[in-house]
Amino acid sequence: MPEMSDPRSDGHSINGDCFTVLVNAEGQHSVWPAAKTPPEGWTEVGPPASKAACIALIEARWTDMRPQGLRDTMRKGMPGAD
């Protein structure tokens, strides 16, 4: 039986598709093992993929690192924003 590598250590698994991207209500993103149930408050976005592909998806989607609550508060404080 082939030895399985720990996906947290090197980004690889025996099938190559062992991670998923999670997002929470604040718009924060995370790479998560696809075989595990996401924690409460986090939702999977996109299909299971390699760790590198998940990181690329996060880099493309999460362009503003500020939490959603802060973005909303700042937007309300801007002139002309309602």
Image (spheres, rainbow, N blue to C red):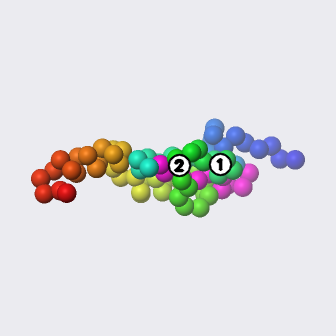
Q: Residues within 10 Å of mark 2 (few under 14, many from 20)?
A: some
Residue at the left extreme of this rendering: 79
Measuring from the top left, give residue 31's x and y in whole percent: 55, 47
Q: Is residue 2 magenta?
A: no
31 or 53: nearer the eye? 31
Q: Is residue 16 magenta?
A: yes
Q: Which mark is residue 42?
A: 2
Helix, strand or loop at label 1? It is loop
Residue 15 seen in the figure: yes
Residue at the bottom extreme of this rendering: 47
Residue displayed at 72% across by 42% down: 5
Measuring from the top left, give residue 67's x and y in whole percent: 36, 44
User: Where 46 sits versus 11, above or below?
Assistant: below
**Which residue range is magenta in the image?**
14-24
Question: Mark 2 or mark 1: which comes first in sequence?
Answer: 1
Q: Residues within 10 Å of mark 1 (few under 14, many from 20)?
A: few
Q: Decide: marks 2, 1 in contact (CB < 8 A)?
A: no
Residue 12 seen in the figure: no
Residue at the right extreme of this rendering: 1
Q: Which three-letter amino acid code belongs to the residue tagged 2?
A: Trp
User: Where 80 sits versus 3, above or below?
Assistant: below
Relative to residue 22, is residue 79 drawn left or right?
left
Q: Which three-letter amino acid code belongs to the residue tagged 1?
A: Thr
Helix, strand or loop at label 2? It is strand
Relative to residue 72, is residue 52 drawn left or right?
right
Residue displayed at 54% across by 61% down: 46
Q: In the rendered image, which quarter contains the C terminus?
A: bottom left
Measuring from the top left, give residue 43's x and y in whole percent: 54, 53
76 or 22: nearer the eye? 76
- State the CA–CA distance, disc 2 to disc 1: 10 Å
Residue that numbered label 1 is attached to? 37
Residue displayed at 47% across by 49% down: 24
